[in-house]
């Protein structure tokens, strides 16, 4: 509790507020209050000192109450957008976000909101941003939303179809796209999330010449490397590597004979092994290819393919994800059966584990292929209009997220303590959040 000597008085838009340095210290050194008092909260009370701010007093009252109690109580007559703008000014957005929803837990997620998109046609991909926002790809357009779910100016690729999107940080997005025939304008670009402007393009060079190429799946590493599958016109099929900071190409892994690295559906950087998972999946290719690439010595350190294996619909791999803690790759088929492959041995078959046999014979007219995600020790798999959550060493089904509006889920993504699910019809995407913990 603050004591008499650390009282501080503010005049905000003509309204007087009194609080304590103890309360303001909760805002942290990176807030406006931390800057005002230079992080020194041991203040002596001076009743003659009044700090004037020409800001909205109603918003200040809500934010001050948030610092006092940890709870965010927004009056019905106060627009949330106005409050968020003021929170940004005071450097309190992180406090507002943590009060609106709690730390991510797949088994406690609740549907917070559904948004109908503005673009014609069906959405193709959704990607969660690091701060709770997201972007949604529709054909040649990428619609960007901040954490308040306000839409920014869209990213327009001028009739080039979007293949993938990847958030570098809350302000920068990398977009991969097909090359426009005869124009040589494919590849990847770094865009501003707030304005949609192109910052720079990532080029592929071969023998000191810039090549036209189609960029596919994207991934990045903690040391600022950006990876993309690349399909070129001649002699540059494989995985390209660029420096995120400079935009310069720094490496290229040419695909081995018989593999399809340039058509990869999914890339995933593995921090523990310093390798890149590359997966080319059905139905893009008749045969599936999954491998781990080590760029330090240009080697393929692990690989699996279903070539030569008896193939049925039950064994078609639709998505794959590496789980480093258990040294395995998890795959899923169109019935949401999970399969596991040991990364410590090469070429072994998939150990399938049935999860949803009841789904057989009940597929919708236009089914969406299941997707996988791993987040904080929980495994997620989309199936039709719901998302299953698996937990524990045996990956037991513990909860299922779903709602009927919008049709089947074509893609989902987790980031910024939110889960975003994009439906195949009506451009609907859902936002799932974990309720905030109770204030004790």
Image (cartoon, rainbow, N blue to C red):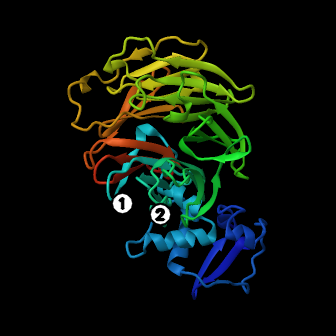
**Residue at which label 1 appears:** 119
- The image shows a total of numbered marks equal to 2
- State if disc 2 and disc 1 touch (CB < 8 Å): yes
Q: CA distance from mark 1 to mark 2?
A: 10 Å
**Dot 2: what SS?**
loop
Residue located at (33% from left, 51% from top): 122
Q: Which of these two is toward me, 433 or 25?
A: 433
Mark 1 crowdedness (10 Å alpha carbons): few <14, some 14-19, many ≥20: some
Q: Within the image, what quadrant is residue 238 found in?
A: top right
Q: Which of these two is toward me, 102 or 275?
A: 275
Examine the rendering and report whether any part of residue 64 can be seen. no
Residue located at (54% from left, 24% from top): 259
Image quadrant for the N terminus? bottom right
Picture coordinates of residue 283 (x, y %)? 38, 30
Picture coordinates of residue 120 (x, y %)? 32, 59
Give the numbered dot on residue 154: 2
**Dot 1: what SS?**
loop
Q: Which of these two is toward me, 309 or 97?
A: 309
Picture coordinates of residue 54 (x, y %)? 61, 85
Q: Is residue 397 above or below residue 83?
A: above
Q: Earlier in the sequence, mark 1 or mark 2?
A: 1
Picture coordinates of residue 33 (x, y %)? 69, 70
Q: Is residue 305 above or below residue 141?
A: above
Image-based side of 215 in relation to 293, left or right: left
Q: Is residue 119 above or below residue 218?
A: below
């Amino acid at each position: 509790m603050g004591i008499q000597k650390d009282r501080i008085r503010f005049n905000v838009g003509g309204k007087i507020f009194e609080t304590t340095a103890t309360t303001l210290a909760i805002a942290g050194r990176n807030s406006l209050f931390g800057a005002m008092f230079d992080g020194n909260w041991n203040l002596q009370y001076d009743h003659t000192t009044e700090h004037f701010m020409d800001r909205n007093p109603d918003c200040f009252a809500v934010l001050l109450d948030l610092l006092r109690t940890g709870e965010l109580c927004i009056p019905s007559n106060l627009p949330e957008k106005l409050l968020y703008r003021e929170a940004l000014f005071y450097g309190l957005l992180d406090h507002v976000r943590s009060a609106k929803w709690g730390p991510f837990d797949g088994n406690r997620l609740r549907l917070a909101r559904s948004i109908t998109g503005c673009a014609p046609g069906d959405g193709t991909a959704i990607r969660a941003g690091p701060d709770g926002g997201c972007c949604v790809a529709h054909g040649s357009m990428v619609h960007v939303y901040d954490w308040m779910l306000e839409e920014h100016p869209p990213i327009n690729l001028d009739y080039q179809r979007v293949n993938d999107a990847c958030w570098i940080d809350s302000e920068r997005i990398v977009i991969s796209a097909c090359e426009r025939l005869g124009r040589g304008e494919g590849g990847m670009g770094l865009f501003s999330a707030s304005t949609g402007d192109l910052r720079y393009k990532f080029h592929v060079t071969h023998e000191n010449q810039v090549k036209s190429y189609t960029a596919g799946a994207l991934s990045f590493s903690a040391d600022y490397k950006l990876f993309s599958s690349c399909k070129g016109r001649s002699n540059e099929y494989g995985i390209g590597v660029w420096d995120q900071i400079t935009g310069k190409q720094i490496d290229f892994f040419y695909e081995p004979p018989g593999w399809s690295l340039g058509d990869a559906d999914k890339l995933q950087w593995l921090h523990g092994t310093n390798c890149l998972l590359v997966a080319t999946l059905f139905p893009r290719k008749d045969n599936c290819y999954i491998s781990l690439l080590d760029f330090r010595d240009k080697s393929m350190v692990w690989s699996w393919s279903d070539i030569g294996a008896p193939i049925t619909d039950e064994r078609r791999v639709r998505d794959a994800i590496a789980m480093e803690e258990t040294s395995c790759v998890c795959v899923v088929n169109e019935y949401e059966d999970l399969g596991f492959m040991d990364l410590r041995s090469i070429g072994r078959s998939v150990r399938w584990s049935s999860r949803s046999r009841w789904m057989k014979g009940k597929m919708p007219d236009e089914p969406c292929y299941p997707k996988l995600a791993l987040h904080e020790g929980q495994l997620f798999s989309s199936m039709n209009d719901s998302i299953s959550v698996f937990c524990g060493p045996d990956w037991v089904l513990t909860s299922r997220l779903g709602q009927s509006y919008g049709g089947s889920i074509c893609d989902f993504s987790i980031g910024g303590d939110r889960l975003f699910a994009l439906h195949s019809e009506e451009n609907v995407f859902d936002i799932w959040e974990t309720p905030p913990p109770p204030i004790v």
